[in-house]
Image (spheres, helix red, strand yellow):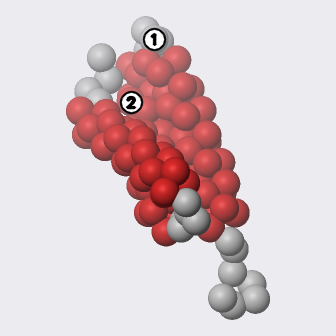
Amino acid sequence: MPRNSMSINEQIAAYSWLQALGTNIQAVGQTKLLSKKKRLQKEGKDLVILGNILQAVANAAQTFLTLEQRGSTGKERTLNSANAFGSFLQSVGNSIQALTTDGS
């Protein structure tokens, strides 16, 4: 491994922060959607989509990184697989939300 590269756990943590950022952006967007002003509603829709995309990307990356981790026991491998599957489901869900957001 090159000296300057991040460990898998550090990469997963970085993507967790990206996921959290996406969650916050999406929440701001949802709040703006409540406005009676069309301009703020449009901004809200755009933020909801952006937030969901960031969450989807982060979860997809976490899926692949988690699968790269090798557990030394059968239990650790099973937990890694279950964790990766959970991240995969979240990624799919956020992708669907981003694609179907209509601002209502």
Quarter-of-image position of residue 76: bottom right
The residue singled out by tag 1 in the image is 34
Residue 40 visible, this angle: no
> Where is residue 69 shown, x and y percent of the image?
54, 66
Q: Which residue is nearer to you in this view: 104 or 22?
A: 22
Image position of 24 with respect to 61: above or below: above
Q: Which residue is nearer to you in this view: 59 or 81?
A: 81
Q: Residue furthest bottom?
A: 2
Q: CA distance from mark 1 to mark 2?
A: 10 Å
Dividing the image into 4 quarters, which one contains the C terminus?
top left
Badge 1 vs badge 2, beta-carbon distance below 8 Å: no
Helix, strand or loop at mark 2: helix
Q: Which residue is nearer to you in this view: 3 or 96?
A: 3
Label 2: few (<14), some (14–19) or many (≥20) C-alpha neighbours in 10 Å: many
> Where is residue 61 shown, x and y percent of the image?
47, 59
Dividing the image into 4 quarters, which one contains the N terminus?
bottom right
Image position of 58 with respect to 49: above or below: below
Give the residue drawn at x 23%, y 33%.
Answer: 100
Image position of 71 with respect to 5: above or below: above
Kind of residue indicated by mark 1: Leu
Quarter-of-image position of residue 63: bottom left
Residue 93 visible, this angle: yes
Give the residue drawn at x 66%, y 61%.
Answer: 9
The residue singled out by tag 2 in the image is 45
Helix, strand or loop at mark 1: loop
> Where is residue 12 shown, x and y percent of the image?
61, 57
> Where is residue 75 shown, x and y percent of the image?
52, 51
| Left or right of 10, for residue 43 | left
Give the residue drawn at x 49%, y 68%.
Answer: 68
Q: Of label 1 and label 2, which has the lower sequence position?
A: 1
